């Protein structure tokens, strides 16, 4: 089973599936699963160049239904000359598998697929269902990927009872963390208008910068919260400040700034926007602000499903993983609208980097964790 996971990972890495291209990765995965009795459905959503390939593969036609969520698309490799072995030329050296997607997340996809096939070979089709929801649009805008497949599943009465998203959750070693939630994201673009003029004649101009600085300082000074049991405090970061002016003797006509907030489960996009507008209003002066809503925050409260994941990880790795919610966004946020979801995968040290890699032993043990998860879940 573990050798099969590594072989499949190499085959998937060899497909140059840079978002939104699939390059045959999902067809390859579907054939692997179909040999074990899975029924595969290829789902394409979007229009024109935005069309996104997705795969839903399932075995069993009743509950309980466990779904693995993942993606076969990868980020661009950058200059291939900087890679030791080539981003899409999988290579094992000293027990390490190199290639784009080894960590994020073709290695994990291969590990679960191999684990599911091994489970079926040993135990037969479970008293329930195993499925994989694989998208080709996680690294991109994510508009026509997991979110659309889940809508399709709901329309076809196939929503899972529980979900596992196999993103690389571990900072340092396999078995370190299980994610039970993620922070939300809200970005803002703040514009303060003034009147351009010569610095020697300030009475003829209106410098917007003091007002912009005061507004940013007020936002930076907000104590948003103290954090919650599983979330760190909400964090506000100023990301750009621009006046469109390179001359030191010109008072700018306007000032612009952007910021991002990563927020916990005490906030929503709406409540944050209300707080920001209230704070800016107290500063005085006219302004314009445009918000861009990213992912919402979510939490799967610890319970039977998360405990099952922890048990499988601990039995295989010897490490009891901590529940965390840190890091960026993932497609787990879409599953959270339908069912309990946890995240567990490989080590994320080299994701999106030149010479991305994963330890072969980690891939093998990850497959063992996933197979043990299936055994525990379907024995209940």
Image (cartoon, rainbow, N blue to C red):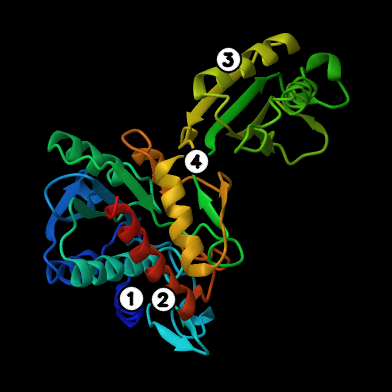
Residue 344 in sight from this viewpoint: no
Badge number at residue 181:
4
Contact, mark 4 vs mark 2 (Cβ under 8 Å): no
Which badge, 4 or 2, comes first in the chain's sequence?
4
Q: Position of residue 247 (x, y in %)?
A: 77, 39
Badge number at residue 274:
3
Q: Determine the CA span between mark 2 and mark 1.
A: 7 Å
Q: Which residue in the protein does label 1 denote?
A: 5
Which badge, 1 or 4, comes first in the chain's sequence?
1
Mark nearer the viewer, 2 or 3: 2
Please say if 359 is above or below 91.
above
Looking at the image, residue 129 sits to the left or right of residue 214; the answer is left
Q: Secondary structure at mark 1?
A: helix
Mark nearer the viewer, 4 or 2: 2
Which badge, 2 or 3, comes first in the chain's sequence?
3
Which badge, 3 or 4, comes first in the chain's sequence?
4
Q: Secondary structure at mark 2?
A: helix
The residue located at (65%, 30%) in the rendering is 256
* Picture quadrant of residue 16: bottom left
Q: Determine the CA span between mark 3 and mark 1.
A: 49 Å
Looking at the image, residue 46 sits to the left or right of residue 229; the answer is left
The 10 Å Cα crowd at callout 4, few under 14, some 14 to 19, many 20 or more, is: many
Q: Determine the CA span between mark 2 and mark 3.
A: 48 Å
Q: Which residue in the protein does label 2 denote?
A: 364
Q: Position of residue 63 (x, y in %)?
A: 19, 44
Please say if 189 is above or below 118.
above
Q: Determine the CA span between mark 3 and mark 4.
A: 24 Å
């Amino acid at each position: 089973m573990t050798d099969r996971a590594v072989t499949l990972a190499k085959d998937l890495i060899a497909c140059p599936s840079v978002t939104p291209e699939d390059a045959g990765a999902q067809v390859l995965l579907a054939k692997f699963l179909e040999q074990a009795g899975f029924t595969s459905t290829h789902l394409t959503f979007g229009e024109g160049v935005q069309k996104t390939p997705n795969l839903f593969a399932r075995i069993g036609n009743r509950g309980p239904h466990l779904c693995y969520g993942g993606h076969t698309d990868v980020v661009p490799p950058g200059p291939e000359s900087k890679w030791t072995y080539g981003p899409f030329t999988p290579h094992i050296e000293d027990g390490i598998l190199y290639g784009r997607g080894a960590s994020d997340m073709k290695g994990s996809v291969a590990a679960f697929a191999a684990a599911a096939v091994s489970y079926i070979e040993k135990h037969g089709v479970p008293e329930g269902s195993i499925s994989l929801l694989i998208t080709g649009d996680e690294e991109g805008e994510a508009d026509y990927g997991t979110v659309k497949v889940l809508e399709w599943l709901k329309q076809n009465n196939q929503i899972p009872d529980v979900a596992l998203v196999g993103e690389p959750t571990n900072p340092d070693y396999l078995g370190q963390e299980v994610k039970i939630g993620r922070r939300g994201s809200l970005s803002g673009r703040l514009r303060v208008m003034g009147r351009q003029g010569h610095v020697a004649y300030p009475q003829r101009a209106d410098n917007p910068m003091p007002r912009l600085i005061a507004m940013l300082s007020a936002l930076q000074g907000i104590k948003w919260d103290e954090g919650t049991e599983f979330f760190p405090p909400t964090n506000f970061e100023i990301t750009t400040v621009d006046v469109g002016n390179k001359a030191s003797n010109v008072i700018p006509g306007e000032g612009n700034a952007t910021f991002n907030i990563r927020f916990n489960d005490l906030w929503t996009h709406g409540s944050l926007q209300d707080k920001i507008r209230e704070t800016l209003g107290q500063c005085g002066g006219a302004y314009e602000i445009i918000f861009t809503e990213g992912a919402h925050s979510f939490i799967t409260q610890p319970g039977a499903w998360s405990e099952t994941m922890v048990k499988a990880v601990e039995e295989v790795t010897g490490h009891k993983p901590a529940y965390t919610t840190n890091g960026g966004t993932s497609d787990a946020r879409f599953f959270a609208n339908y069912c309990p979801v946890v995240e567990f995968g490989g080590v994320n040290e080299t994701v999106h980097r030149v010479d991305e890699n994963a330890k072969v032993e980690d891939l093998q043990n990850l497959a063992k964790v996933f197979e043990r998860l299936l055994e525990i879940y379907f024995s209940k």
